[in-house]
Image (cartoon, grey):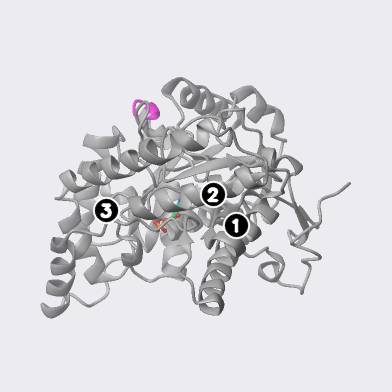
Amino acid sequence: MPLPSPYPQLLDGAAVSSTIPSSELHRVFREADEHERVSGAPVTKLHVGEPYFTPPPEVAQALAQAVTRGHTTYTEVEGLLELRERLVEKLTDENGVDTDVSRVFVTPGSCQGLAALMQAVAEPGAEILLPELHWPIHLQQALLAGLRPVFYPLGRDYRPDPESVLAAATPNTKVLLLNSPANPTGAVLDTATLRSLLDMARAQGWQIISDEAYEHFVYDGEHVSTASLERDVPVSERIVHSVYTFSKSLAMTGYRLGYLSTADERTARAVRIVQEANIIAMSTPVQYAGLEALRLGQVVRENRAMVLANRDAALPAVRDAGLLPELPAGGWYAVLDVAPTGLTAEEFAARLLESRNVAVVPGSGFALIPRLDARGRVMSAEPAPWSRHLVRIAVCVEPRVLRDGVRELLEFARECGGAA
Ligand SMILES: Cc1ncc(COP(=O)(O)O)c(C=O)c1O
């Protein structure tokens, strides 16, 4: 029997944008806030990827100083040269990525960097390969850029097997999106997997967009930047475009500061056009805040240690209860399988919020499969059936909030007869 769809009949006008499903994350944000308002009881928020740690005070001071000193005019569309020079150093030293200021762009969050890259590489009728369990914004961005999404399967450990990625592709596939560490799964791709995906992409004539927003949050193994694996290839033949952010490593979510590095000069020219049209330039004071933030490497290490401590304090109990196959190797989230409770993810999330004031996100929003018409408009979108019991929780929240939320969640699951 098909799942009851929370996304009925999307085709709602001629514009592609009017047919794109709203992000499930945003729906849950609104629902949790509404529940809090109506019930008057505080909601334990395990649905939000908002860290409990805050940006260092030096960052705020640099921002304020930039404003008072009058650094408030437009910068170049690519971003402040001084900041891009520092980012080239960071990418070289930390990520092993060989790049140049001419290929680095400062962006309003990495979200906009991803969207800009998709617009820059999109060709009419081209397909983009996305992981079957993906950040919903990747799907929205692909559709808005005019790329047709195709999904590659993930194994039991949520890591893709290169053979299955190839099997999911078609002759129209032009772009492969990789996200390691991944949202929502926390999966981290190792060098061998990345290398075979890269070799395959090269052989097939694809480009790769590597979303490395959670680069500093790897707990088991190490972060490998996909572009570092092609540093010995001539620039004009490189295919990996990489995206990074200050939001996660330094908790600068509201500053909206990210950056990207294109594989080659041709794509850099295309991104320049996209950015001229979309942003003119990135906020200038925020770029000065970024310059200061790059000096604070120690804070990044402390932030990683805090999320790791949260993971290790809260998640073993969830695993032992049979709701989590293994601890996430990276990122800020864990994907729980609540099948033992007998509830669908939507039922689980709704009843947990109602009875225990705990908000989580149903996994269906991370596994939507849209059906498109010839013009790229979404005619319908259904969650993949295997996602019906998956639920995402955030582990970057305050330790007390995580502990209380997980305790309530496990008690609730036991009540339903579904947790060991
Ligand atoms: C996988 C992934 N990429 C990119 C982003 C974008 O972050 P920002 O735009 O704040 O840099 C997020 C935010 O949650 C994310 O989860």
Q: Residues within 10 Å of mark 2 (few under 14, many from 20)?
A: many
Q: Is residue 211 left or right of residue 169?
A: left
First reached walking from the N terminus: tag 1 or tag 3: 3
Q: CA distance from mark 1 to mark 3?
A: 31 Å
The one nearer the camera, 231 or 288, is: 288
The one nearer the camera, 260 or 256, is: 256
Mark 2 vs mark 3: in front: 2
Q: Residues within 10 Å of mark 1 (few under 14, many from 20)?
A: some
Res. 132 visible in picture:
yes
Secondary structure state at the residue bearing disc 2: helix
Residue 115 screen position, x and y as percent: 50, 57
Q: Residues within 10 Å of mark 3 (few under 14, many from 20)?
A: many
First reached walking from the N terminus: tag 2 or tag 3: 3
Secondary structure state at the residue bearing disc 1: helix
Of the residues shown, which amino acid type is indicated by label 3?
A: Leu
Numbered tag placed on residue 409 in the rendering = 2
Report the magenta stretch's main SS.
loop
Q: Given the current orientation, which residue lies at the most extreme top position?
A: 192
The residue where tag 1 is placed is 352
- Check mark 2 vs ligand 1: CB closer than 8 Å? yes or no: no
Of the residues shown, which amino acid type is indicated by label 2?
A: Leu
The residue where tag 3 is placed is 250
Corner quadrant of residue 143:
bottom right
What segment carries the magenta color? Answer: 229-233
Corner quadrant of residue 264:
top left
